[in-house]
Structure formats: structure tokens, C-alpha cells
Image: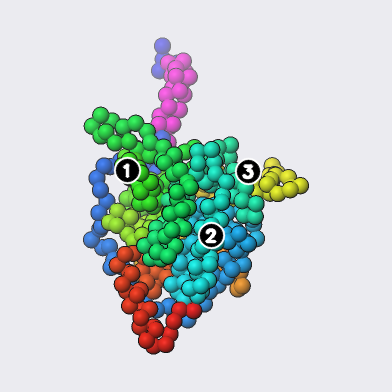
């Protein structure tokens, strides 16, 4: 048998072998292109180049005007019942957006945008209405409500309440207890009506060597990333004696991902345009503005910001990692008399945002303001300046830019609240601060001596 005849007889096997080798080579190439992932039980500590946190200063004239534009959103969208729409002129709110409203009110008062009497009236009205919300069968609030009828709304078949959203709402409630004790009784009465234990669903121990339960996220939890767990855990750990162990234990170990030679938590989200992962940055920004960084959250925030600075220098902006996500509105129209539920045609949003979070990716206004407040450098200043076209006089600030570069025209409570928080951080530091009480009292005394009082 000749060599040619033998090759001809074995050509089918050779074809299969060559195809296998080509496929294997493709797999190896793809794996090399994907970001590297590791799992670690080690703590995250501050790097040597972690910058000094900026000192407080007075706002510039432009910044003072920007703060008043942000507050105008809440003036325009306050309901007669004392709560605020989560989105401009759209009658719905969530526990998350209500937390944003309370934090915006605290910031507006500390920035002297509103008087003490207006601040007290808004806080009391909001707390009283929250106390009248219809509760779920397990005794805690739903995640979403109709802003006019206070009817619970759902985005899915299971609306069991959101522990993450409750964690955000508990932050301004804690601030009120510490800094504004005249509202302490109203806060205590509100919390006494809610059975919060059920929000923390704990599993069994992870292994025999670590007999600690962990926090199991509910199926309908819209903010389930590591960053949001870290953000909410500081307040959720106060629910009961066992919750602290559950909420601070990572679900399956802390998974890290390498992007541009920088290791950050792998949040499990992917962009629709390919292999680049999406970073979740809002919870780290909020942690710094509201609670103050610890070594872990501060270092993660600093690493993410370094990645963003590197990516902003790329000529090909298609590889830019978007770091924030637009809020999804529930179907509030179904709760209105003689109204039909919202429908979606086959040509609209072929990919459901719930199944592809990156479809809602934003280069957000709130993120730009937050980064500038926390880490002031040329890049963060340029980012904030880039968002100035989002200002809508008399209405508030728009959400930011979509992944295709178009403007996201939504004007929301969360965006305008974070802007107020960031500007308040520039003047006073983090919102949840025991040591700031004496400084605030001294400042009020100085203002009184000079004949200047908060408006």
C-alpha cells in the first residue's frame, strides 16, 4: 500500500483530528484572552499608592448651584403623602429610592439649601407614611410601591422584599437616630412595625471547619453583587444577634478578577459586546460617601478607579467598562384604575435587562460626582465636567450616557441624591459620622455668632 493510498484511506480520521486540534487551539486562545480569576480567603489591604482622602472645603459657586438643581428634583416630585417618586413624574418608589430621598434631605439641610423646619416636616411626613405601608405576609415592606395609592408592586412573580434595599433605607434611619434625636421616636416606632428578621435568609454552615451560616440572596434580589452585599451589611448586621455573621460571610469565597493587571472582585456581570467584564462601582462610591471607607471597601474603590482611568485613555471606546446601571421601573400602571399593564413589543429590548444587566449600563452622572468627591484628581474632575450637559434647569440631573454614547434622559431620585451626598461630602465628609457631631455643633455656633444661620 502506497503512502498516498494510506493517506487517502485515513483522510476522514485526519479531518477529525485536525478539527479537534483547531478547536483545542481556539479554546486555549479564548482562555488566554479572558480576564484571570482567582479565589482568595485573604483580606484586601490598602496598597502603597492609596491616596490621602481629600480635606473638606467650602463649595464653589457652581457647586452650590448644582446642589440646588439636584434638590429641585425632590421639590418637583414630592407626593402629598410625603414620599418622593423614584423617577420624575412616574408614580412609584422603592425602599432604595426612599433611602435616597432621606439622604438627600439630610444633605440638603447640611448644605443649607432647606430650613430646619422644612427638613423636620419632610422627615416626619416620610416616616409617618412609611409606617402606613401595606406589608407582605411575612411582616416587612415590599420592594416597590405605587407612590399615590401605596399599593405594593412587583417586577417578578416573587416580591419577597429586598434586604439590600432595606439596608440602604436603614442608613438614613441610623443617621437620624444619631444626629437628629428628635426624630428617634418616630424611627423606633417605624422599625417596631416591621419584622426584618425574615429578610436575612441564612443557609447552613459552608463546611465543617467554618461553622458560620451565610446570607442567601433571594431569587428576586436585583442587587446581588458582592459590592452591594458589602455596602448593605453594615446596617443589616444590626437586625438581630445572628445576622452579623451571616451578612459579612462571603457566599462562596471572594472571587477576584484581573483587569489591566489590577485585581478586583468578580461581580459576575458581562458586557454585551464581548469578553470585557463589567465593574459594579456604585456600592463602593456610596460606602465612601455615607459610611466612610474601611480598608477593604476603600482599596476596592481605588483599584476600580485606576482601571477606569486607564480605560478612559483608550482610543477605542468600545472597550470602555461601564460601571453603573439604570434602575428598572416596576409595572405601576397596572395598579391604576382603568389602566392596562405595560406591554413590550417584539422589537423593543430584545434582551431583557434582568437577564442581561449590562444592557442597562451607564456612564453615570452620579458616579462621576461620587468619584470626584472621594478621589479628587484631574481624571475625576474631567469626568464631572463631562456630565455638566446632564443638568436640566428646574428639574434635576439626567442619569448619564448609555453604552452607545447617547444621553439617558431619565431624571431619577437616586442620581440627584448621590449628587447632593457627594457635594455634602466635599464640605463635611461622610454622612454617618459620630465625630462629626462636635464639628457640626461648633460650626453652627460660629455661624450664630456671625449672624449667619442655615436657611
Which of pointers 2 and 1 lies earlier in the amino acid sequence?
A: 2
Element under disc 3: loop
Residue 90 falls left or right of residue 130: right
Q: Residue furthest top?
A: 1
Q: Quadrant of residue 285?
A: bottom left
Residue pointed to by mark 1 = 241
Magenta span:
6-26
Tag in front: 3 or 1: 1
Question: Is 433 placed above or below 162 here?
Answer: below
| Mark 3 and mark 1: Cα distance apart in space | 45 Å
Which of pointers 3 and 2 lies earlier in the amino acid sequence?
A: 2
Q: Quadrant of the N terminus?
A: top left
Q: Main secondary structure of the magenta part?
A: helix
* Residue 291 makes an appearance in the image: yes
Q: Residue at x 47, y 81 (%)?
A: 61
Tag in front: 3 or 2: 2
Give the number of marks: 3
Picture coordinates of residue 343 (x, y %)? 70, 44
Residue 437 falls left or right of residue 189: left
- The residue closer to the viewer here, 431 or 242, is 242
- The residue closer to the viewer here, 425 or 77, is 77
Residue pointed to by mark 3 = 350
Q: Is residue 192 magenta?
A: no
| Mark 2 and mark 1: Cα distance apart in space | 28 Å
Residue pointed to by mark 2 = 126
Assess whether mark 2 and mark 3 are in contact (beta carbons under 8 angstroms). no
Picture coordinates of residue 162 (x, y %)? 48, 45
Element under disc 1: loop
Amino acid at each position: 500500500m502506497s503512502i498516498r493510498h494510506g493517506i487517502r484511506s485515513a483522510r476522514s480520521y485526519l479531518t477529525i483530528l485536525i478539527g479537534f486540534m483547531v478547536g483545542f487551539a481556539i479554546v486555549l486562545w479564548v482562555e488566554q484572552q479572558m480576564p484571570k480569576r482567582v479565589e482568595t480567603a485573604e483580606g484586601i489591604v490598602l496598597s502603597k499608592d492609596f491616596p490621602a482622602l481629600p480635606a473638606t472645603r467650602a463649595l464653589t459657586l457652581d457647586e452650590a448651584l448644582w446642589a440646588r438643581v439636584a434638590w429641585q428634583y425632590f421639590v418637583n416630585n414630592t407626593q402629598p403623602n410625603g414620599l418622593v417618586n423614584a423617577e420624575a413624574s412616574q408614580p412609584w418608589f422603592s425602599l432604595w429610592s426612599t433611602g435616597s430621598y432621606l439622604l438627600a434631605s439630610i444633605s440638603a439641610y447640611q448644605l443649607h439649601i432647606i430650613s430646619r423646619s422644612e427638613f423636620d416636616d419632610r422627615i416626619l411626613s416620610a416616616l409617618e407614611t412609611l409606617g402606613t405601608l401595606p406589608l407582605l405576609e411575612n411582616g416587612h415592606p415590599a420592594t416597590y410601591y405605587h407612590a399615590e395609592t401605596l399599593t405594593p408592586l412587583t417586577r417578578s412573580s416573587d416580591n419577597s422584599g429586598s434586604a439590600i434595599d432595606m439596608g440602604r433605607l436603614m442608613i438614613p434611619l441610623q443617621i437620624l437616630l444619631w444626629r437628629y434625636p428628635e426624630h428617634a421616636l418616630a424611627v423606633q416606632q417605624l422599625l417596631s412595625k416591621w419584622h426584618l428578621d425574615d429578610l436575612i435568609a441564612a443557609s447552613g454552615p459552608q463546611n465543617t471547619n467554618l461553622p458560620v451560616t451565610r446570607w442567601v440572596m433571594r431569587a428576586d434580589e436585583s442587587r446581588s453583587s458582592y459590592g452591594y452585599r458589602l455596602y448593605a451589611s453594615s446596617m443589616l448586621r444590626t437586625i438581630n444577634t445572628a445576622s452579623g455573621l451571616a451578612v459579612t460571610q462571603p457566599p462562596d469565597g471572594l472571587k477576584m478578577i484581573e483587569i489591566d493587571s489590577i485585581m478586583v472582585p468578580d461581580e459576575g456581570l458581562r458586557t454585551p459586546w464581548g469578553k470585557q467584564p463589567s465593574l459594579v462601582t456604585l456600592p463602593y462610591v456610596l460606602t465612601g460617601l455615607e459610611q466612610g471607607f474601611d480598608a477593604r471597601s476603600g482599596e476596592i474603590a481605588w483599584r476600580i478607579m485606576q482601571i477606569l482611568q486607564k480605560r478612559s485613555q483608550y482610543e477605542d471606546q468600545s472597550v470602555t467598562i461601564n460601571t453603573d446601571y439604570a434602575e428598572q421601573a416596576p409595572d405601576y400602571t397596572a395598579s391604576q384604575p382603568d389602566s392596562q399593564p405595560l406591554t413590550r413589543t417584539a422589537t423593543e429590548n430584545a434582551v431583557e435587562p434582568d437577564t442581561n444587566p449590562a444592557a442597562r449600563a451607564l456612564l453615570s452622572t452620579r458616579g462621576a460626582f461620587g468619584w470626584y468627591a472621594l478621589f479628587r484628581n484631574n481624571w475625576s474632575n474631567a469626568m464631572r465636567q463631562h456630565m455638566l450637559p446632564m443638568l436640566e434647569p428646574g428639574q434635576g440631573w439626567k442619569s448619564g450616557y448609555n453604552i452607545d454614547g447617547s444621553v439617558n434622559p431619565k431624571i431619577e431620585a437616586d442620581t440627584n441624591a448621590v449628587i447632593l451626598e457627594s457635594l455634602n461630602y466635599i464640605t463635611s465628609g461622610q454622612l454617618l459620622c459620630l465625630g462629626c457631631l462636635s464639628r457640626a455643633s461648633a460650626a453652627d455656633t460660629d455661624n450664630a455668632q456671625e449672624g449667619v444661620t442655615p436657611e
